[in-house]
């Protein structure tokens, strides 16, 4: 991992657009989704598994590397879905990220994290609206089924 792929470094320093690859992982019946919580299930919010793209790495290679680093599973299929362009304020400075989302299939359903302090949970899609899964715009597109049809989602305002 380098400074350009490290979320904490980017958040603290700013100054560049952070590019990441994220996974939307549904079970075989497509009625449950795998989510991640840093700090365990008491964490304030959940997110999608993935992380920063390293210089010289393709988006697909990044999502496969991230899942290999973070889980006990192997990727069996990926399909690029969309990009989320995110603008938000951090300590009164704007931060800008591009999160590329893939629909990912894994070789197993009993997913175990490789990193301490992280938990994975399968959540029924029917209960997803009650989960603070970020970014919320992606959560909503999964709930309404539009995530397979969108191409570019924008969160925030570049001029904020």
Image (cartoon, rainbow, N blue to C red):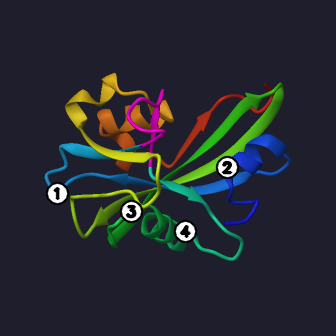
- Compare marks 3 and 2 and give the one earlier in the sequence: 2
Contact flag, marks 3 and 1 (Cβ < 8 Å) = no
Extreme residue toward the left, this view = 29
How far is disc 4 from disc 3 in space, using C-alphas?
A: 14 Å
Q: Mark 1 = which residue?
A: 28
- Compare marks 4 and 2 and give the one earlier in the sequence: 2
Q: Look at 66% across and 66% down and name the residue there.
A: 1
How far is disc 3 from disc 1 in space, using C-alphas?
A: 18 Å
Q: Look at 35% across and 61% down and name the residue there.
A: 104
Please give the label number shown on residue 7: 2
**Tag 2 secondary structure:** helix
- Residue stretch in magenta: 37-48
In terms of depth relative to the viewer, which is nearer, 156 or 6?
6
Please identify, in this view, whether the residue under mark 4 or under mark 2 is nearer the observer.
2
How far is disc 3 from disc 2 in space, using C-alphas?
A: 19 Å
How far is disc 4 from disc 2 in space, using C-alphas?
A: 14 Å
- Compare marks 4 and 3 and give the one earlier in the sequence: 4
Q: Mark 4 = which residue?
A: 62
Extreme residue toward the front, this view = 116
């Amino acid at each position: 991992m380098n400074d350009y792929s490290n979320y904490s470094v980017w958040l603290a320093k700013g100054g560049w657009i952070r590019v990441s690859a994220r996974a939307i992982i549904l079970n075989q019946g497509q009625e449950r989704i795998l989510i991640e919580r840093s700090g365990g299930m008491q964490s304030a919010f959940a997110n999608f598994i993935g992380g920063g793209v390293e210089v010289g790495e393709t988006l697909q290679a990044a999502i496969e590397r991230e899942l290999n680093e973070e889980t006990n599973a192997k990727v069996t299929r990926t399909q690029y879905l969309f990009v989320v362009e995110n603008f938000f304020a951090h300590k009164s400075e704007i931060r800008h990220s591009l999160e590329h989302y893939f629909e990912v299939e894994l070789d197993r359903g009993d997913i175990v994290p490789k990193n301490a302090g992280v938990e994975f949970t399968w959540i029924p899609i029917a209960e997803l609206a009650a989960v603070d899964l970020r970014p919320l715009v992606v959560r909503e597109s999964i709930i309404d089924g539009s995530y397979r049809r969108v191409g570019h989602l924008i969160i925030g305002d570049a001029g904020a």
